[in-house]
Amino acid sequence: MLRPWLPIPPDSDFSIHNLPFGIFSDERPARAGVAIGNWVVDLATAHGLNMFPHHPEAGSAFRKPVLNELVALGRGFSDYVRKIIQTALCDSESVLKQFSDHLLIPQKSVRMHMPLKVGNYTDFYSSEEHAFSVGKIFRPENPLFPNWKHLPVAYHGRASSIIVSGTPVPRPRGQIGQANGTPAFKPTNALDYELELAWVIGKDSSVGQPVSVADAEDYIFGALLFNDWSARDIQRWEYQPLGPFTSKNFASGVSPWIVTWEALQHFRVPAPPQQPEPLPYLVNEPRQNFDLSLSVSIRPDNGEEFSVCQTNARGIYWTVAQQIAHHTVTGCNLQTGDLLATGTISSKDISQKGCLLEATLNGTQPIKLGEGIERRFLEDHDEVIMRGFGQNGDVRIGFGELRGKVLPPIS
Ligand code: CA
């Protein structure tokens, strides 16, 4: 039992078991930190006080405005840093306690930044409930395409417009197909969120060398919450035959704290069985997912927030190991800081759908938020709030919040 001297609220996402990494700034420039309770541990200052004596060379990684250099030092290094902080939090004689005025900064007084320079972002489509429900809206006779149970379907997304929680999203304009077969140019009338997790790649692989499904998990640094903002009406007109383009390239949100692979191990669960068995390069046993509760709320302008989705990541059909094996099987390489997103995560019930497209059956069945308030898709000034956490006995670990507010279109 770990007993920290720092008061940590029992329902905090940032328990002593979590210790996720992020980039924050106060009156000093952006730099690396670890979240604990309502505080941030300033890693650059901690390094200056010799809290990490086995890694004197790591100081520059803590002072960078993104975590790529720290991530590239490997999971052995990040686990070492977390272990030192965990031990210091339970030792009332520690440097962390003695210099807590300098080392612990209240989260409410800092600004969080985009934690990574993301080189590549790939968006999968791994939740069977989501793929089936969306397929059923458009192809009731044939919801899943014949490839879906044989490979983890994905497309290469846009990395430059990945934004950190709190960054507003202006309503995009684009081409929207009309009944007469020609496009109108106007703001989207079907703006949606997609509730996803994104895996952070923690080490490079080489061009021409596939990563085997058995080795794939070694390449993961941790995970974030991910909101793949989508304009459904633009998507409907543009997506054939090469897939979504401007309907999804304007913004994708991430939560600011990267929950580490080590911290997530508390929540491993068996993944659902696969039938038919995939090709050998995608077969690994045991196949495992993570038991993580995920939710979405919408907060209309200046109003209270309403829950619109409660789901869980444990039922994902294609595991992250299978995603990596498939992504690299051609010889495509992974780079440190890449993100692999799961795709929208949904469960069976209508209250468990990770996007409005599914929850409102493509806008035909509005969902009720509160008295006199309903939504088919998002309206201007709506704020979308995503949360996620795991709970296993006394161990609770969460991602914090991923917030994004819809602004009126840029004129
Ligand atoms: Ca998506």
Image (cartoon, helix red, strand yellow):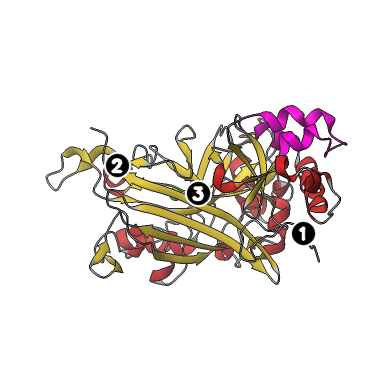
**Is there CB contact under 8 Å for labels 3 and 2?**
no
- Tell me how far mark 3 sits from mark 2, CA to CA: 18 Å
Q: Which mark is residue 4?
A: 1
**Residue 8 location, x and y as percent?**
67, 60
How many marks on residues? 3
Residue at x 42%, y 53% (from the top left corner): 194
Q: Give the quadrant of residue 48.
A: top right
- Tell me how far mark 1 sits from mark 2, CA to CA: 45 Å
Callout 2: 10 Å neighbours few (<14), some, many (20+)? Answer: many
- Tell me how far mark 3 sits from mark 1, CA to CA: 31 Å
Residue 312: tell me if it is visible: yes
Give the residues drawn in magenta, as a range: 42-70
Q: Answer with mark 3 or mark 1, whichever residue precedes in sequence.
A: 1
Q: Give the quadrant of residue 332.
A: top right
**Of the pair 349 and 279, the residue shown nearer to us:** 349
Q: Which mark is residue 226?
A: 3
**Residue 23 location, x and y as percent?**
61, 38
Residue at x 43%, y 47% (from the top left corner): 228
Q: Answer with mark 1 or mark 2, whichever residue precedes in sequence.
A: 1
